[in-house]
Image: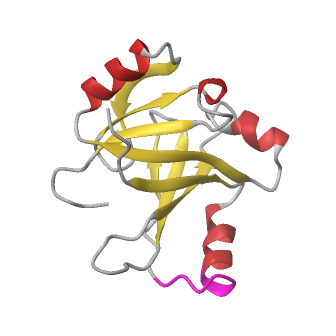
């Protein structure tokens, strides 16, 4: 297992619409995807694309809004009403090998491997096993899309 590219930083928000305004007006973001629902995960998401540098793709900021009261991020927003950094996400070339690596290290995987917002397999590693950070591991998108 080898550390891959930092794909995105997940930011929980009570309102994607308000966060988009913030990233456009305060941070100068110009490339923001349209929000879309991920009902199987109980969230609505969109991506703020940071500029590329030296031919490298920029890291994304994933804005995450709960879809309903049973959303997976509702508890986080209850503790952090303004929202905030929720997780970091690293790419790996082979999701099954990465999962086996983390399990072999005794790290707690939260739930099954599933399809994430980029359309590729993902899983999360418990923050208590990752120096306090909820960590998403995602398989690198095959078409190069980030």
Q: Which residue is more in the foreground, 117 or 132?
A: 132
Residue 123 highlighted magenta (yes or no): no
Q: What x and y, as percent, mark residue 117?
A: 39, 48
Q: Where is residue 112, by image quadrant?
A: top left
Residue 46 % position (x, y): 48, 61
Residue 140 vertical placement versus 23 (above, below): above
Color style of the picture: secondary structure
Q: Quadrant of the C terminus?
A: bottom left
Please name the residue shown 27% across and 78% down the image. 55
| Overall secondary structure of the magenta section | loop
39 vs 113, left or right, is right
Which residue does the image show at 65% across and 78% down from the upper left? 21
Q: Looking at the image, how many numbered discs can be counted on the residues?
A: 0
Front residue of 24 and 124: 124
Residue occupying the point 69% across, 70% down: 18
Q: Position of residue 39 (x, y in %)?
A: 47, 38
Comparing 30 with 133, the one in front is 133
Residue drawn at x 26%, y 25% is: 97
| Horizontal relation, residue 121 to residue 17: left or right | left
Depicted 41 relative to depicted 36: above or below: above
Q: Quadrant of the N terminus?
A: top left
Q: Determine the residue located farthest toward the left in the rendered image.
A: 143
Q: Quadrant of residue 72?
A: top right
What span is in magenta? Answer: 24-30
Q: Position of residue 132 (x, y in %)?
A: 68, 34
Left or right: 56 in relation to 63: left
């Amino acid at each position: 297992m080898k550390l891959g590219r930092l794909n995105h930083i997940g930011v929980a928000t009570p309102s994607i619409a308000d966060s988009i305004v913030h990233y456009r007006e305060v941070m100068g973001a110009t490339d923001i995807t349209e929000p879309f629902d991920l009902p199987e995960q109980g969230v609505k998401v969109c991506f703020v694309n940071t500029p590329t540098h030296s031919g490298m793709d920029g890291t994304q900021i994933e804005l995450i809004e709960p879809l309903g009261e049973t959303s997976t991020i509702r508890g986080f927003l209850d503790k952090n009403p303004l929202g905030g950094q929720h997780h970091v996400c690293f790419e790996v070339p082979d999701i099954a090998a990465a999962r086996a690596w983390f399990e072999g290290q005794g790290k707690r995987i939260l739930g099954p491997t599933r399809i994430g917002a980029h359309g590729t397999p993902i899983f999360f590693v418990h923050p208590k096993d990752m120096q306090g950070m909820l960590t998403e591991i995602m398989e690198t998108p095959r078409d190069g899309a980030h």
